[in-house]
């Protein structure tokens, strides 16, 4: 009897505990609500029909930074500069303009209040080339600047002439209305972002460091207004990247004695290298939630269906399950881990000749909080073969950026402006997987954000650097409205918004 009553009271205790946990889970879910409503929508600013044809003309000047012909490269950038000077006469008449390394452009609109830190907008002038053999897949020739079906088509229409031109359009409009800045505004347009950005953004950032300048905020191209990109959220989501991943490329090499393939060793250089690559593929780097992704969930979670909301409101319990789940899916794993992508493999010259060496190239995109050296150390541990050498390769190499806050006045201003211009969207912090010029400016501001104010749905993602790159005319007009309002509310009449 005693035994039985002990069991019954044990079961009751367990049930009570389960009940308490369920109550906590649901209570947390119910209190997991969206932060205050969107800002008041604005009456849309009228944008001149000339704006899209100016962007079209910009697209027709193919300033390709990887163009090997130096003369052609030089003349395309000069042509682009002349085009800008002709089309934005007030900007070029009233702002100080500096050229760095001949082709990078730095515009300065001097404010009246020197106690305010300046704001800095970044874009890049250069574009990537068209992959040979894909020209005929374009609906319109990539450098024709064709406007059709509600879109402007062409290389650079999105990346990144859209933000460069939209910010100049906004500035020209403001100057035409006699606007005077309170806060100093700088615009920096590098010319080699697509090949690493050292001579453009890198040199400009170095100059700022030498001058001891720091910025209230820095805004670069980056994440977009995703339409249907966040599972469970119906509204479009303006993703403002508060950090970007680091970039590292490693070359793995193995070596062997040459000779005839009829008398092979137990493992050839190819076999050894393949084993190393396979180990890396089989053992991905550890997964975890970083601050930008946590911030994204706390912003968007309340807008998701209750099952997801229950999980996101209770990360104290579900975090390991959530992380494991995200790490297991191709579409979500980049949010939670440093990704491993073997991209190139070269070895051997003939089918019956033993290779003397073999090499593979592996590209990593590093989570905030981890360093390149930590990744290299992990890679060596995973490969676990001292005869395979590991060295840095590739033209770009950078640690992940610092993480900027979503509580800063600058983020709040950005959020407000995005909501004013796009009343239907939610604004969320995010982690950017790609690298931007903003990484050169790490440390020059506590508030570095990466956002391109255009709408992108799933099938559009491959257009960037790909075939049929385009921008909707309406999106471009909204991008101009975005910069106009951003300059108005943070530079001309800076609104006091408290950090906190
Ligand atoms: Zn870009």
Image (cartoon, rainbow, N blue to C red):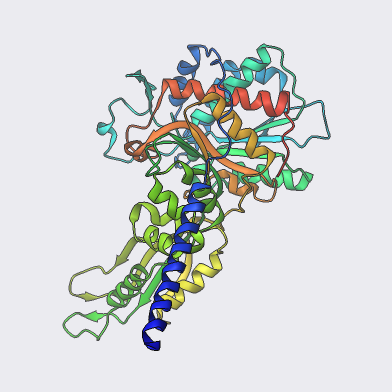
Q: Which quadrant of the figure contains the N terminus? A: bottom left
Q: Residue 484 sits in which quadrant? A: top right
Residue furthest bottom in the image:
2
Q: Is residue 104 visible?
A: no
For this rendering, which residue is in front, 38 or 2? 2
Above or below for 241 versus 353: above
Q: Residue 353 sits in which quadrant? A: bottom left
Above or below for 138 versus 54: below
For this rendering, which residue is in front, 500 or 243? 500
The mark tally for this picture is 0
Q: Position of residue 445 (x, y in %)?
A: 69, 45
For this rendering, which residue is in front, 218 or 422? 422
From the viewer's perspective, tell me whether residue 99 is left or right of residue 157: right
Above or below for 469 versus 324: above
- Point 44% across, 49% down: residue: 309
Q: Position of residue 406 (x, y in %)?
A: 61, 45
Residue furthest front in the image:
1
- Point 39% across, 67% down: residue: 284
From the viewer's perspective, tell me whether residue 65 is left or right of residue 173: left
- Point 44% across, 40% down: residue: 67
Q: Is residue 86 visible?
A: yes
Q: Position of residue 192 (x, y in %)?
A: 53, 41
Q: Which quadrant of the figure contains the C terminus? A: top right
From the viewer's perspective, tell me whether residue 251 is left or right of residue 125: left
Q: Position of residue 119 (x, y in %)?
A: 69, 35
């Amino acid at each position: 009897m005693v035994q039985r009553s002990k069991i019954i009271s044990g079961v009751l205790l367990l049930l009570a505990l389960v009940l308490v946990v369920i109550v906590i889970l649901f209570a947390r879910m119910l209190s997991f609500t969206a932060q205050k409503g969107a800002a008041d929508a604005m009456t849309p600013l009228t944008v001149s029909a000339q704006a899209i044809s100016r962007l079209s003309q910009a697209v027709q000047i193919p300033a390709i930074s990887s163009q090997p012909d130096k003369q052609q490269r030089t003349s395309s950038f000069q042509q682009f500069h002349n085009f800008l000077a002709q089309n934005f006469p007030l900007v070029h008449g009233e702002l100080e303009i500096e050229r760095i390394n001949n082709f990078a452009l730095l515009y300065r609109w001097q404010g009246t209040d020197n106690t305010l830190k300046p704001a800095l907008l970044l874009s890049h002038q250069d574009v990537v080339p068209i992959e040979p053999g894909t020209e005929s897949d374009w609906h319109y020739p990539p450098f024709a600047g064709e406007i059709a079906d509600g879109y402007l088509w062409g290389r650079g229409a999105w990346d990144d002439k859209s933000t460069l031109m939209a910010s100049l359009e906004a500035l020209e409009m403001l100057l035409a209305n006699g606007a005077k800045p309170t806060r100093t505004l700088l615009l920096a347009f590098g010319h080699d972002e697509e090949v690493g950005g050292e001579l453009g953004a890198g040199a400009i950032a170095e100059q700022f460091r030498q001058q001891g300048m720091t910025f209230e905020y820095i805004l670069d191209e980056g994440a977009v207004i995703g339409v249907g990109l966040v599972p469970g959220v119906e509204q479009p989501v303006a993703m403002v990247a508060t950090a970007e991943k680091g970039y590292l490329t490693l070359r793995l090499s193995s070596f062997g004695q040459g000779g005839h393939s009829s008398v092979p060793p137990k493992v050839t250089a190819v076999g050894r290298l393949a084993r190393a690559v396979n180990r890396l593929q089989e053992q991905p780097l550890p997964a975890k939630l970083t601050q930008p992704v946590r911030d994204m969930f706390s912003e968007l979670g309340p807008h998701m269906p209750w099952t997801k909301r229950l999980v996101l409101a209770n990360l104290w319990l579900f975090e390991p399950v959530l992380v494991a789940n995200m790490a297991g899916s191709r579409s979500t794993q980049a949010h939670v881990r440093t990704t491993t992508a073997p991209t190139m493999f070269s070895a051997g010259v003939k089918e019956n000749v033993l290779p003397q060496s073999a090499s593979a190239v592996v590209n990593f995109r590093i989570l905030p909080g981890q360093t390149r050296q930590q990744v290299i150390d992990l890679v060596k541990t995973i490969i676990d073969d001292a005869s395979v050498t590991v060295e840095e390769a590739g033209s770009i190499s950078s640690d992940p950026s610092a993480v900027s806050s979503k509580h800063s006045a600058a983020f709040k201003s950005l959020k407000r402006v995005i909501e004013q211009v796009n009343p239907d969207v939610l604004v969320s912090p995010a982690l950017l997987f790609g690298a931007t010029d903003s990484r050169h400016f790490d440390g020059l501001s506590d508030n570095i954000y990466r956002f391109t104010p255009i709408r992108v749905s799933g099938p559009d993602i491959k257009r960037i650097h790909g075939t049929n790159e385009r921008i909707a005319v309406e999106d471009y007009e909204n991008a101009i409205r975005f910069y106009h309002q951003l300059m108005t509310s943070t530079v001309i009449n800076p609104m006091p918004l408290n950090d906190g």
